[in-house]
Image (spheres, coloured by chain):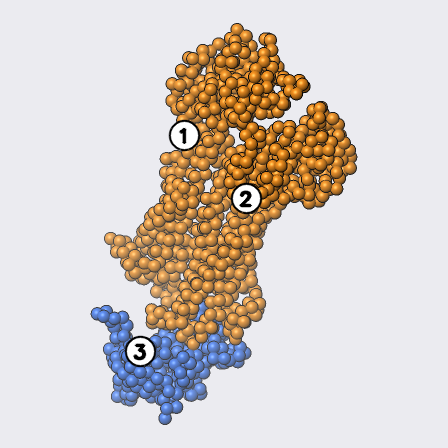
């Protein structure tokens, strides 16, 4: 059913540069992502995971192939709204407090100030950041900043959340907690998760595993066979 | 070796940053060096002007027993001497002539003997008006006193000899009579009032009139023309001329004393050079400081990236010393190239604006300017690039450098030291105290004892505007920071039309970025205050220089005569019809005795005089020209007198003042009653001390002649052209002299106002425009560029262009409005202070500041365009951020 297909890719590729210096990060990737799927995107460093996440989030455009979002709407209306991204690097806005950063996602989709802040408070609690709402990003540790970015991604109530190494800077226990929170929030909000990760334990907690090697995507690999 | 590799990498990979830094240093050096060119040009023009207006360079007074031939031979052999002519002077008890059956007699005077080619040798000394160019020539005033003309027999009273009678061959004018008749003695040269009555005769006639055996009361001089191949700097030229004069006196060994007219003029020009220096301080240095600050802003825009690169080097094991040396190498590269670009640019600008591409009037001066510019350029590059790098390298640890947040500018931090010390308030207070003290003590930059302007510069007083400027900049920082810190609600409300639902977020972001925004507002404020104060000062200066010139010349063009009969009848009507003439207004110029004091009296029509010349409020006590002239018009026998006269005679308005004026019928002075109606401080063509202004009709009725001696002409075209037209229409021998404001300003006005500010104005105003546009556009663009990553994140979160625009335009509006408003206020205030301190330069002082609206509109337009370009450029960039930034997220 088209309304269940969030993303459909047909032989998409992304090449950077041209001529002899050209680098192809994603090669002829074809897949379908349905609502409710939970995907762990795994692969070695430099295999093209982040580029694929950017393409799915419409942060970047493929240089070849077709990419569609049948159930999410027109490409220009994917963010803010149906798609949210939690980046692996420092992605909080420096001049805003943690609470303002998280609430911003809700404000961008049209929520009023009070509702956005209430929602942000709940999400900060869920991500173990209670009491840090008034801090500036520069005052947070790398792990705290990453959790705040996850809270922000959920605050916009997306249908598809793409997270790039969301637990890369967390210790093992915290990473487990973050993953628990993400799965719980996704279940409550009916959010489809795509998580790019190196962490086998994280990957194991998602129903689907997509493997990237040298830019080539091997999709719909059941967790047990990866 | 590693430094070279690193430098090569910087040039190849960070080309934009390096070029920006070179441009920043280049502009600052350009401005400094261009000011050097202004110095050169202004000093050289002072020298040229001083030299050009001296008809006779030296007047060598011969000792009574000295041999004329031997002395001339010695002088001719002196290096630099171009021409020599002998001139003799004799005292006379007076001249008399019988005209129309009436015998007229003058007071004591002088008979002068000059060779036939004297006027050609020293152009400007003698102006032939009527009749022959040799023989017996009467000075214009003497001819007027005697009623003599060509062919009149004039009797000369020779002391110790019988009177003799000569026939007048021509009438002449002696434009430089003051220096021509100066007393040259052992105590130097003394300017004295020239004799009222003068007759010029040939050397042959002189020999008959004053034979050697009866030479009592005679003097001999040798007038000398020098080669004017002198150094451009007035000080150097003065030293050169004085040295030559001293050498000649030593060689003459008592046979002659040099009256050094050339050195006297150069000495005055030397003083004026101090004035140019002062203008440099007022008008130039702030621009250089702003350019240096902008260079710092450009360099700091690459600071974050540089810190990251240094962090990388530190992690790889580079010691802080090596990191500093690498930054110093980059600074030297930027400094050398920036200085070269600046010096080349200054040479071009100097050639275009001042007509010189040199940086000094003399070789050493030029070298000094170049060296100063090089030191400044290198110092600026080291201060803006190497110094921050050294500071970072000292505080950087390997562990800290590995932190992902390393290199980012912290948003929060302690208040700056100056803020805690209230340096802004201290600067403004100190400036105010200095200003108050200067105004209270009546400090005048130009003193004019006996009408000779002298400069008295108190550099301490000049601190006032500088302190105001610094204080205003720091206060702008404090106000902007406070507004951003405490005014979030107001900001949110103000940004709501742009940001809608995001207004709270925008206000919060702006509040926390107050350091960066306040810095932008300060730079804009500094630039705005600099541009505004320079523009207002220059416009006021230009306007007042014109008023000054018009006051001295009377009007755009003036026609004057000393003849009792006055100007030719109907001249006003004739001139009025000439093309380019707006109005022509006749004015009587008579002399009247106030008690025993002979004063100039001007007969005017109070209702129409303002059509032909400016009637400034400053001309009259009470500061209301219209009211004073109306009071004069309403009292037919009214008279305006000087404050000195009011004081001397204890006058009250309405008192009768009896003046003695010469009657046209019998030339006798008769008492005429006038009513004192007001005080005149200045008046067109009037002397600075005492004079009188009355109704022309009343003066005409009581003296028996309506003759006007002055015609004031207002033009709407070239005064020079109109003057030429009037001159060509005058009959030969009319005795009328035509002066135009343009020529007179160059020749007769104070050298202070004669300094040509046009080039400096062009340079300053162009730079102010450039700096204002650069400060607003660049500061905003660089500030936004520092936050490229922030905007990229906002875009990735899904912020729409309009929402990103809300951030960009709100910041731009805050920086632009705060900077322009506070800077504008500061600029206006500083212009007031500068004009007030320099009031003495203007005569009369300006009634109000002249605002260059067209320039200010251009300034506003350039600033707005720069801001729109910077904001628009950033918005375009944020619509799809570069993959470099995105991959970093």
- Write down the residue under mark 1: B230
Q: Give how far across and how far down residue A121 sits, in percent.
A: 50, 78
In space, the residues marked 2 and 1 are separated at their CA atoms by: 42 Å
Pick the front one: B574 or B294: B574
* Residue appearing at x 57%, y 67% in the figure: B490
Question: Which chain appears blue?
Answer: A
Residue B213 appears anywhere in the view: yes
Mark 2 → mark 3, Cα distance in angstroms: 76 Å
Point 60% across, 43% down: residue:
B583
Chain of the residue displaying label 1 = B
- Please rate how many residues cluster around mark 3, counting C-alpha atoms within 10 Å: few if below 14, some from 14 to 19, many from 20: many
The residue at the far bottom in this view is A1
Question: At x 40% / y 83%, what residue is drawn?
Answer: A74
Q: Which of the labelled discs sits on residue A62, or is there none?
A: 3
Q: How many marks?
A: 3
Which chain is represented by orange in the image? B
Q: Would you name the residue on which mark 2 appears?
A: B579
Task: Provide the chain ID for the residue under circle 3.
Answer: A
What's the CA distance linking mark 3 and mark 1? Answer: 76 Å
Quadrant where the C terminus of chain B sits is: bottom left
| Image vertical order of residue B269 relative to residue B794, above or below | above
């Amino acid at each position: 059913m088209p309304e269940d297909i969030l993303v459909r890719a047909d032989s998409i590729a992304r090449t950077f540069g041209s001529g002899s210096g050209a680098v192809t990060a994603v090669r002829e990737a074809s897949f379908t992502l349905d609502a409710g799927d939970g995907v762990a995107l795994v692969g070695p460093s430099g295999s093209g995971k982040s580029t694929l996440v950017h393409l799915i989030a419409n942060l970047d455009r493929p240089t070849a192939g077709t990419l569609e979002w049948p159930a999410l709407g027109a490409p220009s209306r994917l963010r803010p709204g149906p798609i949210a991204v939690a980046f692996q690097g420092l992605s909080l806005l420096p001049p805003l407090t943690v609470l303002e950063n998280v609430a911003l996602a809700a404000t961008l989709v049209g929520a009023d100030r009070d509702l956005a802040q209430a929602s942000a408070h709940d999400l900060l609690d869920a991500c173990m950041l209670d009491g840090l709402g008034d801090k500036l990003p520069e005052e947070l540790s790398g792990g705290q900043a990453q959790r705040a970015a996850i809270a922000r991604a959920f605050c916009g109530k997306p249908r598809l959340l793409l997270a790039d190494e969301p637990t890369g800077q967390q210790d093992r226990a915290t990473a487990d907690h973050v993953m628990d929170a993400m799965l719980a929030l996704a279940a409550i909000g009916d959010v489809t998760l795509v998580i790019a990760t190196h962490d086998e334990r994280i990957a194991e907690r998602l129903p689907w595993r997509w493997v990237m090697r040298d830019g080539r995507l091997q999709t719909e690999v059941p967790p047990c066979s990866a | 070796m590693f430094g070279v590799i690193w430098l090569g990498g910087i040039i190849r990979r960070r080309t934009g940053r390096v070029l920006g830094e070179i441009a920043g240093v280049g502009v600052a050096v350009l401005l400094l060096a261009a000011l050097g060119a202004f110095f050169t040009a202004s000093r050289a023009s002072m020298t040229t002007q001083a030299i050009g207006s001296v008809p006779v360079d030296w007047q060598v007074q011969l000792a009574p027993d000295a041999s004329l031939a031997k002395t001339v031979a010695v002088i001719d052999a002196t290096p630099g001497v171009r021409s020599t002519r002998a001139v003799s002077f004799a005292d006379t008890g007076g001249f008399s002539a019988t005209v129309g059956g009436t015998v007229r007699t003058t007071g004591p005077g002088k008979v002068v003997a000059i060779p036939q080619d004297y006027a050609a040798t020293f152009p400007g000394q003698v102006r032939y008006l009527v009749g022959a160019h040799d023989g017996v020539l009467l000075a214009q005033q003497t001819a007027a006193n005697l009623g003599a003309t060509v062919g009149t027999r004039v009797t000369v009273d020779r002391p110790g000899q019988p009177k003799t009678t000569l026939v007048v061959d021509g009438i002449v004018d002696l434009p430089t009579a003051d220096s021509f008749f100066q007393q040259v003695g052992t105590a130097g040269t003394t300017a004295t009032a020239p004799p009222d009555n003068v007759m010029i005769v040939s050397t042959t006639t002189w020999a008959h009139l004053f034979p050697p055996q009866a030479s009592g009361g005679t003097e001999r001089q040798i007038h000398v023309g020098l080669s004017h191949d002198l150094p451009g700097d007035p000080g150097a030229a003065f030293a050169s001329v004085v040295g030559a004069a001293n050498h000649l006196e030593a060689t003459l060994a008592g046979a002659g004393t040099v009256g050094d007219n050339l050195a006297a003029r150069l000495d005055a020009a030397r003083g004026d050079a101090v004035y140019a220096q002062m203008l440099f301080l007022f008008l130039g240095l702030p621009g250089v400081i702003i350019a240096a600050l902008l260079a710092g802003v450009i360099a700091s825009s690459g600071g974050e990236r540089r810190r990251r690169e240094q962090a990388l080097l530190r992690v790889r094991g580079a010691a802080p010393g090596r990191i500093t040396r690498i930054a110093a190498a980059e600074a030297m590269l930027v400094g050398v190239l920036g200085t070269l670009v600046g010096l080349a640019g200054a040479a071009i600008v100097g050639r275009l604006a001042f007509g010189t591409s040199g940086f000094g009037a003399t070789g050493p001066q030029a070298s000094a300017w170049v060296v100063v510019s090089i030191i400044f350029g290198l110092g600026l590059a080291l201060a803006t690039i190497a110094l921050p790098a050294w500071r970072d390298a000292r505080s950087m640890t390997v562990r800290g450098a590995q932190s992902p947040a390393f290199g980012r500018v912290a948003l929060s931090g302690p208040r700056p030291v100056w803020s805690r010390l209230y340096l802004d308030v201290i600067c403004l207070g100190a400036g105010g105290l200095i200003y108050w003290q200067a105004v209270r003590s009546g400090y005048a930059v130009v003193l004019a004892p006996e009408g000779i302007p002298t400069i008295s510069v108190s550099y301490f007083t000049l601190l006032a505007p500088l302190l105001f400027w610094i204080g205003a900049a720091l206060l702008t920082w404090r106000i902007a920071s406070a507004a951003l810190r405490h005014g979030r609600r107001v900001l949110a409300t103000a940004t709501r039309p742009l940001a809608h639902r995001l207004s709270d977020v925008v206000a919060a972001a702006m509040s926390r970025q107050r350091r960066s925004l306040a810095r932008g507002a300060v730079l804009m404020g500094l630039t705005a205050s600099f541009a505004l104060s320079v523009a207002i000062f220059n416009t006021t200066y230009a306007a007042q220089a014109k008023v000054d010139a018009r006051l001295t010349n009377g009007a755009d063009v003036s026609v004057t005569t000393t003849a009792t009969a006055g100007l030719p009848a109907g001249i006003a009507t004739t001139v009025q019809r000439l093309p380019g003439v707006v109005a022509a207004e006749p004015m009587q110029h008579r002399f009247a005795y106030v008690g025993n004091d002979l004063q100039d009296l001007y007969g005017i029509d109070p209702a129409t005089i303002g059509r032909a010349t400016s009637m400034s409020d400053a001309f009259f006590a009470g500061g209301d020209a219209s009211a004073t002239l109306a009071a004069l018009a309403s009292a037919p026998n009214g008279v305006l007198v000087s404050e000195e006269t009011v004081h001397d005679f204890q006058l009250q308005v309405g008192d009768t003042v009896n003046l003695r004026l010469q009657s046209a019928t019998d030339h006798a002075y008769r008492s005429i009653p006038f009513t004192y109606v007001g005080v005149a401080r200045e008046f067109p063509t009037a002397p600075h001390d005492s004079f009188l202004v009355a109704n022309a009709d009343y003066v005409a009725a009581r003296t028996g002649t309506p003759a006007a001696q002055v015609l004031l002409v207002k033009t709407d075209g070239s005064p020079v052209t109109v003057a030429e037209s009037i001159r060509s229409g005058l009959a030969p021998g009319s005795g009328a002299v035509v002066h135009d404001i343009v020529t007179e300003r160059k020749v007769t006005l104070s050298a202070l106002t004669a300094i040509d500010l046009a080039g400096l104005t062009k340079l300053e105003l162009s730079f102010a425009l450039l700096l204002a546009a650069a400060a607003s556009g660049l500061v905003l663009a660089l500030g936004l560029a520092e936050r490229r990553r922030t905007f990229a994140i906002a875009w990735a979160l899904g912020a729409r262009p309009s929402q990103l625009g809300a951030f960009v335009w709100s910041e731009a509006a805050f920086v632009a409005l705060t900077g322009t408003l506070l800077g504008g206020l500061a600029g206006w205030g500083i212009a007031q202070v500068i004009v007030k301190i320099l009031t003495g330069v203007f005569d009369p002082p300006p009634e109000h500041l002249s605002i260059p609206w067209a320039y200010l509109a251009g300034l506003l337009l350039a600033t707005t365009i720069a801001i729109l370009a910077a904001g628009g450029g950033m918005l375009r960039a944020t619509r799809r951020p570069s993959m470099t930034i995105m991959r970093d997220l």
